[in-house]
Amino acid sequence: MRYRADISGLRALAVIPVVLFHADPRLAPGGYVGVDVFFVISGYLITSIIAADLDRGGFSLARFYDRRVRRILPAYGFMALVTTLAALVLLPPAMLVGYGDQLKAASTFLANRYFLSVTSYFGPAAEEQPLLHTWSLAIEEQFYLFWPLLLVGLAHPRLKALRPYVVGALIAASLFVATRNAVLRPAPAFFNFTGRVWELALGATLALGLLPRLMHPWIGEALAAAGVAMIAAAVAVFDKHSVFPGALALVPTLGALFILWAGEGGHVTWAGRLLSLPPLVFVGLISYSLYLWHWPILVFLRLVAGPHLSAAEVAGAVAAAVAMAAVSWRFVEAPFRRAGFTTLRDELKSIAIGVGGLAVLVAIGFGFALSHGLPGRASAAALAAEQAAADAWAGTGLCLLGPNQSLPLAGCRFGRRDTAVPAIALWGDSLANHHAPALDDLARRMGFALVQLTKAGCSPRLPVGEGRAPRTTEARVCDGFRAAALQAILADPAIRIVVVGGNWDAGGTLDAALASLGEAVRKITASGRGVILMAPTVAFASGGGRCIARRRFMGLDEAGCAMPASEAAARASRVETALAALAATDPLVRAVLLRPHVCDATTCRPLIGGQVAMTDGGHLNVAGSMALRGDLAAAIGSLLPALPPAR
């Protein structure tokens, strides 16, 4: 197909917001929509090539995949090798093992499935995954596997008339799945191929001639202008809270389609001339390499400099990404794209070399796992910090419920196992779960059983009740868990004290969450039970315990893992004040404030007594939990005399 400069400019309009969003979301709140624009462009271009070959009767799967190999793999391989070398230098053993898993997934084009599998409450943060951005490459490669075969089948004279209906049905079904998941299951909506294929197929409708020709120049002008405005509006107005992808993705994707449509048949619009300006064309030409390079550069910079980059650091990272993209495009991407082959044997050889290169990367990923992350690279202090950060409560896997899991909890009874003894219930989310080591120890010492009722991401409070059903599937499951957990507490006469912990500031309205917590506490105390409210510790954006392990490995100042005490106090004050108020108004309630254990007058650190006390940015490890045992013991000891006789 003929070269269109405006498509290069459209690529720039896609990649620039993505880079800005990842560098600092404030620069482009909806910049993530650039990926959706890329999908529409890819669907249009790939389908144009396939359709042209089919019309000539010369389509070849070998030629198609040879082109894909030369277009995608050299630049990807170059980025992956350099990123792997950086990982060897900068990532401690456990993180290197995780990086190896990323490398395997990215190099087999299953990254979207892999990153969906590790997207969890305790999964690595996005800023700790240098190859996270390859999920979109996986979507495209999965599309390339089935799309040519579908078009070849629909090119048969008896089936060609069905092509508009098949493509339309595919778009409708995929868009429905995307919209449903965006509302009910946001993580699968983001990563699943089934909810993204409609965006690629949307671009294909134009390439297949399923849209009418534009008969008047003013229609093209209007479409192109509307397309630019729609993409710009999505970038400016959407943000991380938008229900996306799904129906909202129609705004940027239709915008991209309008721009492509307006330029069909050699028409040049005002917007097309704007997108054809040399600076935008250049960015568009290097856009694939820029997309590949920008994310690992930002990840490694944040690991070294901290999560909050200065304006100068952001500018430097973007400039470095552009420089590496230009080098990659000039010396890797462009030469391989120009090196076309004319014989089947050469095409198959090219494909085999590409697959062999990917196999080498996969082997490196396996090597990192088999070698346990090459621990010989790390000092004893770094290894000790990494081990401490990984030392979580042994009952977490069984007794901290995950997505779509609700009661009953089997085997989540600790402390004294005798069913005749009184019990302490631990209710809440992961910020309750991390107190289990200390409670287990105290329960055994004080003659109590410990009953754990915890679910990740599900802060303890009253269920919302009928008529106010939560939006997502997981929120509904969480609401059911709250109801079942509260019922289990009130129905068990052995439970005398309920220890409550949660992140009430996660989603929704904090005031409403705390008010609902207060109602739940009053229900419990009205039944003659005592309540101990555990305030959260401190949320370290640096990664807390993992940050200490990384910086010890790199030999950097651990002050980079700290945060100002004033900032921590400002964030925690509303929750701590509300919990203290509940305790002040009810003799059967105690509030335990944990922030003083990790903060002095000026600074908060993920350490207690000089020891790593957190697994990540917000959760205590076993040592951290045990270090707070005295506060819990004092709260339990002060409650016992105040409790009415057991019923």
Image (spheres, rainbow, N blue to C red):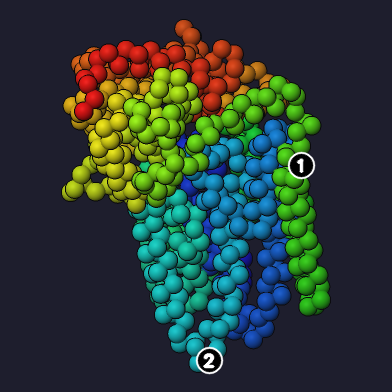
Foreground pick, 316 / 375: 375
Secondary structure type for disc 2: loop
Identify residue type, mark 2. Answer: Pro
For the point 47% across and 14% down, which residue is it? 597
* On-image quarter of the N terminus: bottom right
Foreground pick, 264 / 63: 63
Q: Tag count in the figure?
A: 2
Task: State the residue position of label 1.
Answer: 371
Residue 157: numbered disc: 2
Query: Which percent across, then down, holds residue 23?
Result: 54, 37
User: Which of the 4 image quadrants contains residue 609?
Assistant: top right
- Extreme bottom residue here? 158
Judged by depth in the image, the label closer to the viewer, 2 or 1, is 1
Identify residue type, mark 1. Answer: Ser
* On-image quarter of the C terminus: top left
Q: CA distance from mark 2 to mark 1?
A: 56 Å
**In contact (CB < 8 Å): disc 2 and disc 1:** no
Earlier in the chain: of badge 2 and badge 1, it is 2
Q: Is residue 214 left or right of residue 531?
A: right
Residue 22: numbered disc: none
Q: Is residue 472 above or below residue 90?
A: below
